[in-house]
Image (cartoon, coloured by chain):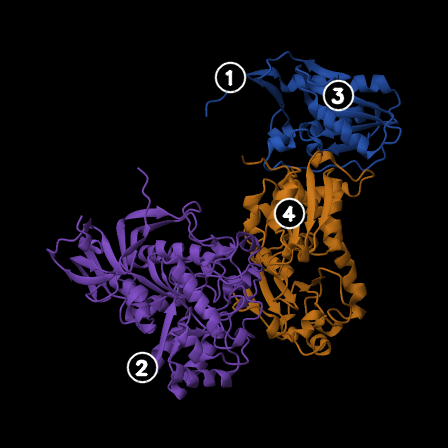
Amino acid sequence: MLGIKALPREEIEAIFSLAKSFQEISTREVKKVPALRGKTLINLFFENSTRTRTSFELAAKRLSADVVNFSASSSSLAKGETIIDTVKNLEAYHPDIFVIRVGSSAALYALTQHTEASIVNAGDGRNEHPTQALLDMFTVSQQLGSCEKLKVLIVGDILHSRVARSNMFGFRKFASQIILCGPPSLVPFDCAEEGIRVEYDLDAAVESADVIIMLRVQQERQTSAFFPSLREYSKNYALTPRRLARARKDALVLHPGPVNWDVEIHSSLKWRVHPLILKQAENGLAVRMAVLFSVGTKKRTL
Amino acid sequence: MNAKHEDEMIIRNATVVNADGEREADVWIRNGKIEAVGRGLTRPAAREVDARGKHLFPGFVDLHAHLRTPGREDEEDFASGSRAAAKGGFTTLFCMPNTEPAIDLEGIAWWVREEGRRVGLVDIYPVGSITRERKGKILTEFCALRHAGCRTLSDDGDSLADSLLMRRAFEYAKLADVLLVSHCEDAQLSQGNSMRESRISSRYGISAVPDIAESIIAARDIALAQYTGGRLHLAHVSSAKTVTLLRQARAAGVRVTAETCPHYLVFTVEDVEKSGFDSHYKVNPPLGTADDRAALRAALRDGILDCVATDHAPHSRIEKELPFEDAPFGINGLETAFSALYTHLVLTGACTLPQIIRSLSFAPAAVAGFTDRGAIAPGYTADLVLADLSRCWTVTEEEWCSKSVNTPFLSRKLSGVIECTWYRGRITYQEQRSG
Amino acid sequence: MTALPRSCLLTKEEIAKTLYRLACEVVEQHGKLNEVVLIGIHTRGVHLARRLRALIREREGIQLPLGILDITFYRDDLTAIGPKPVVRETKVDFDLQGKTVILVDDVLFTGRTVRAALDEIIDFGRPQRIELLVLVDRGHRELPVKADYVGKNIPTQRNAVVEVRVQEHDGADEVILKKR
């Protein structure tokens, strides 16, 4: 699974229904089913991410797949071995699933023709992070009953966010409205497609939102002059109790984690928003099990 | 055989295509020159070529190619580049100075010219750099470079960021009688760019460059050319905005000419997406929108865009195997230029065949100041291309001449097969036909 | 599509009678029933287990705990059945430690479903004993599995289809045989 863009709504729903079953498994005494017994999964991370990698690793292990973690720094790629080389080398071990994270956007599409195994995108540059969006949407549908016809507000550095991109495409498949809110310098060029609205003023944007997805601020963006200072950023784009009060009373606040408290979300809201953010992590495991299960049990096309 | 007639040849019954039109004629060649063009030439020549049903073009002149030599001979050298050029119908070729070392001294320029001669398949002209080591700080010795064969100067690969230095270059170029070729790119705006900023780049989070990165510098250089009365040639024009500037400048009498490349006339940013972000579609400036392509095609028809240059940019297989954002820019273009234009512009009705031949032969020859090439006419050099436009070919690695194969046309079928190329009356390429 | 030739193996009344007999056998075997739990295998095994529970409650006044098992994740042919197996609820919300589990399914055929169910039950805990109750045993075992309670033994051809239909799921009670 390379992204949400090309994923039909029915498949998203099938993943959600599987994820529900997998939630139950994680409550069992033996948190493991033999569904992917004998399958090999390689976690291929060209970019560090302990959280996502751990979540995938645990998901695979609860499905009884054999998991190998392979971390390669992007610098070694520059020295000659390309991602394609690396994948082909690992292909010699006949893996069934590659879970890949890579720093450059849209790098995985060209990779599919070089491997027999299924590829699951664990984040490709600024393009997509499909399992994060699926877990966000799964969390929302568990809380609100569905992802249908909601007002979903995404706040922060949209330009560099693969989480924002995947969610933008995902929620719209359920006829939800997307509102992008962030400093104009961090909103992508010409992104106001059908179902997407851009709003620079968070006070206005938060009005009647059902779901608020707060993005993580990459501190290094500040030095590239996308915005003048963290102080001014937080002033304009941090979720504060006052701002949250303008949203619907039961509005869900999501964050891909880890949160920079008081930069993205005011710490006095921690009691209010943290439980759901932790729930996201829990759901992440079930959703990733569902994704691995559905790609791992797919018949290979010869 | 009569020894006297050894250097003589008549190509009979070809459809001769020049910038001003096409007609069926015989072409009589003697001592590397075109002696006569007309119906039913009776001169008994030593050799006759029957070209009935085939097309004969003046040899193509490429104002913009990268032969990677000296420095990256693993990607291309003069021998492989010359073979690729001859196969593509090119008889004159200008090679850009973004080499290692750069062509910034007359000695290096001499060496390039000599190495090209030694291979002898195509007339290779060095393009000297405008500044030493292409660093944008100190002007090179224009007169010395001109003396060593540089008709054009360029810091191609980078724009000259310093407007004062560019002004000086325009002024000084008048003394040396060299043409400044400007690679238009605002380096700050294009920082980290991999493709044209567009809805597609936004959807996929790909670092992108706006079209104005090109037109801002084009506008500056046009203004400088106008102000100094200098001559300017815009390299690889890719955007509608630059075309608009070019039209205005031409109307205002500025001495500016321009080229675009086959890929900007054929592909758009949509093709990048369709290819699954195949780095063979990564080129600088990047592929534009459908509107850009339409503007470029219109300007080519009008002659506002004078030339089509290949911007032949070989890159190793390994480098192009990198993910889209990490791969280097460049398309390998010599071998596919004509067929790509014929297939995608002539056969679709976007341009006529004489318009294409004008942009590949006549106009670039004129821009570079040649008076002996670019047309099939008495007195001109016998640089000729014979093509069968009724046949197709598939671009394959096996029949590829360049050392690198970084072309988006790989595995594609193109119409128009070049059967033979004559450079100064000598065959430099002949199609190998099996069966 | 032409319908396969079919014949009725058990009628509604016969099914009711058979289930009653099976309930009696379970009671006879286990006396007090206080350590006995029922686990039905999706889909029809669950309905049969519910009916057995009701019959036992009528007879003995004891409500046995009832679990539901979906064995999809334990199948040995997951990649072969692809692409999208339907996964239903699994619910065993009581402790299995020291219990006697009576596993209920509609048809016993190759034994592979039972194998998967045994694996899954053991992942939930360590019962004292597991017994197998089926409405129909049609033979053709591929694994060494034997039922403790059998409603009816029906010899069949390997490629025939035995279909147990229940009111709750299929709108009628009957067991039919389809021949290929």
Q: CA distance from mark 4 to mark 3?
A: 53 Å
Q: CA distance from mark 3 to mark 2?
A: 94 Å
Question: Which residue extends farthest top?
Answer: C155
Instruction: Please state the chain letter of the residue tagged with numbered disc 1 in the rendered image.
Output: C
Name the amino acid, label 2. Answer: Ala
Question: Relative to C70, is B339 on the left or the right?
Answer: left
Instruction: Please state the chain letter of the residue tagged with numbered disc 2 in the rendered image.
Output: B
Secondary structure beneath dot 4 equals helix
Q: Could you confirm whether marks 4 and 2 are on the same chain?
A: no
Task: List the residue tagged with mark 3.
Answer: C133
Task: List the residue tagged with mark 1.
Answer: C5
Q: Colour of chain B?
A: purple
Q: Could you confirm whether marks 3 and 2 are on the same chain?
A: no
Picture quadrant of residue C138: top right
Closer to the observer: label 4 or label 3? 4
Mark 4 and 3 residues: CB-CB less than 8 Å, in contact? no
Task: List the residue tagged with mark 2.
Answer: B251
Residue A23 place in picture, x, y as percent: 74, 45
Name the amino acid, label 4. Answer: Thr
Task: List the residue tagged with mark 4.
Answer: A86
Question: Which residue extends farthest front?
Answer: B3
Instruction: Please state the chain letter of the residue tagged with numbered disc 4 in the rendered image.
Output: A
